[in-house]
Amino acid sequence: MPKIIAIVSQKGGSGKTTLAVHLATRAAQAKHESCVIDTDPQATAAAWGDWRGDFLPVVVTAPPARLARTIESAKKNGVDFIVIDTPPHADAAAREAIKVADVVLIPTKPRAFDLHALEPISDLVSFAKKPAYVVLNSVPSGATLLTEEARATATEMGLEICPIELGDRAAFHRSSAKGETAAEGDPNGKAAQEVEALWKWLRKTLKKAKK
């Protein structure tokens, strides 16, 4: 059975696609047959896949109603690591992705409006009883107090917090525009190090997760 990661957020610009393509690419580098399923009508992950060309991960588009069938097709093609990128402002898409996921990641910037958007996702993951973790993203350098407050807010909603944070780094934006990841552009950079730490944490988390 493939490992399935759902990346959900009701807020646009939270970093879902960046997180999806980085994790799927890191999985491919770890010799997984990896795939991103892009359920967002804007198809940002699919555009990244077009820019990337024939290199893994494979990126496919699918409306939420066809998500289960798309996963089945991926399984038949030997895919063993799937990352689902979902659109903002879409409960139905998030619900379908959460339903099939082993682990749910909820990226958010550590700001009030972004944190407010966690509430509906908190309800969905609580109902589905799936392991779910808030990933603080685009964290400004030195913003210790801001991140502490963000962690407290998410915890009050009953959400668990991923111990790895992603900084507000230009490397993420530069690499995405080329169909690359931060590690491919600068293997020794801080962005690459953060993704590597997140990958190691995710592997351990997946081992603990149960369907």
Image (cartoon, rainbow, N blue to C red):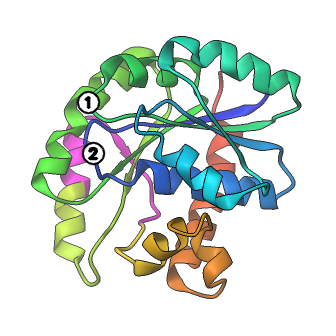
**Where does residue 107 sit, x and y in percent of width and height?**
37, 50
| Kind of residue at badge 1 | His
Any magenta on residue 162? yes
Quick one: label 1, few (<14), some, or many (20+) residues within 10 Å? some
Q: Are marks 2 and 1 in contact (CB under 8 Å)?
A: yes
Q: Position of residue 132 (x, y in %)?
A: 45, 36
Q: Is residue 170 above or below residue 95?
A: below
Q: CA distance from mark 2 to mark 1?
A: 8 Å
Quarter of the N terminus within the rendering? top right
Residue 139, percent from left and from top: 30, 70
Secondary structure state at the residue bearing disc 1: loop
For residue 116, above or below residue 143: above
Magenta-drawn stretch contains 90: no
Res 201 visible? no
Q: Residue at x 73, y 57 (%)?
A: 53
Name the residue beneath numbered marker 2: 12
Bounds of the magenta segment: 151-165
- Residue at 79% across / 54% down in the picture? 54
Occupied quadrant, residue 142: bottom left
For numbered disc 2, what is the local secondary structure? loop
Labelled disc at residue 89: 1
